[in-house]
Amino acid sequence: MSAALDYTRQEMMAIATGREIRDGELAIFGVGLSMLAGFFAQANHAPNLRSMTEGGVYGATPVGGLPWGIECNRLAANATSFTSALDALGFLVASGRCDVGVIGAAQVDKFGNVNTTGIWDGDIGPHYRPPKTRLPGAGGANDIACGAGRFIVMASHERKRFTNKVDYISSPGYLDGGDSRARKGFVGGGPSAIVTTLGILRPEPGTREFVLDGWFAFSSVDEIKAHTGWDLRVAPDAREIPEPTATELANLRRVDETGALRKK
Amino acid sequence: MPNKLISLAEAGRRFSWDGMCYASGAALPVGSDALVFGRELLRQKRKDLHAIFHCCGQQLNLLAAAGAATKAECGFAALEVVGFANGLRRAVESGRLALEDYSNLAMALRLLGGALNWPFVPATVNIGSDLQDRSAFAPDAYPSREKIPAITDPFSGKEIGAFSPLKPDVAAIHVTLADANGNAILLGTEWSRFELSRAAKRVVVIADAIVDPGCIRQYPNLVRIPELLVEAVVYWPFAAWPHSSPGMYDMDEEHMFFMNKALASEQGTADYIRDFVESYSDLDSYLDMIGRDKIAHLSDSVSSFLLDPYRRWILPADEVARLTAPDAGSKEIAA
C-alpha cells in the first residue's frame, strides 16, 4: 500500500505538480524542482508532453542527473533542437502557444503574485533601494507568468514565504485580485495552482484569492494555516490529496537519479 | 580572406575602456559565457563598466565582486542550481552596483530592438509588475514611467509597454567554433547571442576552437554569426570555464562552487583574482591553472558527440598560434 511508502515532502510536491500537467501539452520548465516535476509528468502520465526550456532546448530529457542549469550539457546531450530565448520565451510563450509553465517562488502572496527579486526590511517605499537580500530576479518566470496558458507556482510552505503581499512583484499572478489581472490584457491566464511542501492552493473564482484546495497525508489544515501569512480560507470541497503511488514514486526517482528531492 | 585572430591581451586593449557599455554572457549561467574576457578586463584594470548580460554568469559575478562594474542590466541574476551569485549579490546589497531588472525575454527583445535600430520594442511582458514600476537606475521615480513606459497599441487601443533597445559598445561573445575570419558556429542554445551580435557596435568572438574555412562552407546554415559582424577573433580553449560549453566540456562543479564562495567576501575576491585572474601569462599557463587532469575530465562530456561533425576541421593549437603571431593580422589566409 502506498501508506507504507517512504517519500519526502519535496517528492510529494514534485509529484503533485506533475499531476497538474496533462498529456500532449506544450510545457516550459525552469531549472531544478520545476524541471523534475515536468520530466516526472512526462515519464509518468504525459508521454506526449512537448517540453522546452526558456533558453530554447527542445525535446530533451536529462542525461546523468539533474541539470545544473538550462543550458547544461546534461540536457544538451539529448536535445532535438537548440534555438534561443527569443524563440522559446517569445515565439512559443509570449505568443500564447505554450499551455503550461512551472515556476518557483521565494515569496508568493494571496493573489499568486511571485517575488524572486529580493527581500526588503519592510515596504520598499517611494524611493527604490537595494534589497536586504538580493535574490535571482525574474528570469523567464515573468514571461511565463504573462504568456503561458496557465502556470503552477512551486514553493516551500513557510510563513515568511506565504505573505499577504509580496515585497516586489517579479512575476504577476492576479495582481490585486478580482479582474485586476484581466484588465492588464495578458495573453496568459494566470496561476492555476500553488503547490507547496504541505498541500495545494487554488484561486477562488471571482476574488482570485488563493484558498486551500487540499493537504498532503502528512499535513493538515491547521498546519497549513499556521504556515501561511494571510488568513487562508479553506475551499468547501478541500480534501486530502492522494499519496504517491508506487509507480509515481518509481517514475519520479528515475528522473531524479541524483536524489536531489530525497534530501529531507 | 582576412585573418582577425588576435591575442586575448590585445583584444582586451583594443576593445575595452573604462565606462564602456559591455555585453557578454548571453547564456544562462552554467552555459557558455565569454568568461575569460571578463578576467582580461580585470587584468587590464577596467572600471565603471555598464554591464549588459542576458543572465548573470560567473563573469558578471566576478566583475561585480571586483568592483569593476557599477551598473548592470540582466534578466536572471543567479547561478541556477549552483546558487545565488555571491559577488553580484554583495555588490547590489551594498549599493556599489545598480542592477536594473528585466525578464529573460525582455533582454532578448531589447537586443533585437537594438539590432533592428527600432526606437522601442512593444512590451507585453514585464508590464503590470515591479519590473515596470521600479527602476534601480532612476530610484526616485515611483512608479517609474521611464524604464518601461506605458504606451497605447495604435491598432487595438490597449495599453502595453515600451522596452528601450540595447546597443552595447562592445560584445564579447563566446562561440564554440570560429574560422580565423570570424565566421562562428555555436553549439547549444544561442540564448541571445544571435541578437547580441547584431545589436553591439563592436563584436569580438572568443572561440574554444578555430576551424578551417572549409568547415564554415560545409555548414553555412549553422553560421549564426557571420564574419561581417566580427572585428576580432580570440582563440581560447576553456574560455567559458568553469561554465560548460556544449560539445566541448562540462561545467567544473568544484570550481563553480569554489569561485562563488570566494566572491562572497572582499578577501576571497582578492585571493581569487590573485590566483585565477592574474596568475597566468598565456594560454598554456591558463590551462595549467585549470589543471591538465581536470581538463581531461571535463572534456570527457556526455555532449562530446555534438562536436563530431566538425572535428576534422579543427586546427591544431600550434597552427592557430602561428596565425595569431603579432604580424599575422596583416596576412591573408588562403581560403
Image: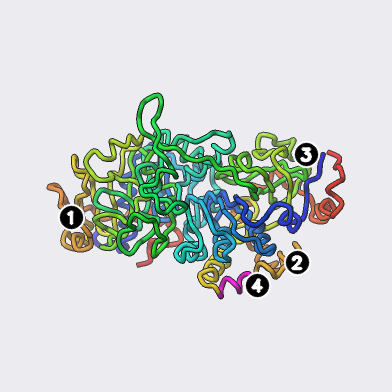
Residue located 52% across and 70% down the image: B261
Whole-angstrom CA distance, mark 4 to mark 1, is 53 Å
Provide the chain ID for the residue under circle 3.
B
Q: Label 2 sits on what residue type?
A: Ser
Which residue lies under the disc numbered 1? A232
Circles 2 and 1 on the same subunit: no
Mark 4 or mark 2: name the one nearer the start of the chain. Answer: 4
Q: Which mark is residue B274?
A: 4
Which residue lies under the disc numbered 2? B281
Q: Is residue A26 left or right of residue A77?
A: left
Query: Which of B302 and A95 lies nearest the eye of the viewer?
Result: A95
Provide the chain ID for the residue under circle 4.
B
Residue A67 percent across, percent down from the top left: 49, 55
Q: Label 3 sits on what residue type?
A: Gly
Mark 3 or mark 2: name the one nearer the start of the chain. Answer: 3
Query: Against B66, is A108 above or below?
Result: above
Whole-angstrom CA distance, mark 3 to mark 1, is 66 Å
Residue located 63% across and 58% down the image: B38
Contact between marks 2 and 1 (CB within 8 A): the answer is no
SS assignment for the magenta stretch, majority: helix
Whole-angstrom CA distance, mark 4 to mark 2, is 13 Å
The boundaries of the magenta stretch are B267-274
Which residue lies under the disc numbered 3? B214
Residue B281 percent across, percent down from the top left: 75, 66
Contact between marks 4 and 2 (CB within 8 A): the answer is no
Secondary structure under the numbered disc 3 in the rendered image: helix
Residue A128 percent across, percent down from the top left: 39, 56
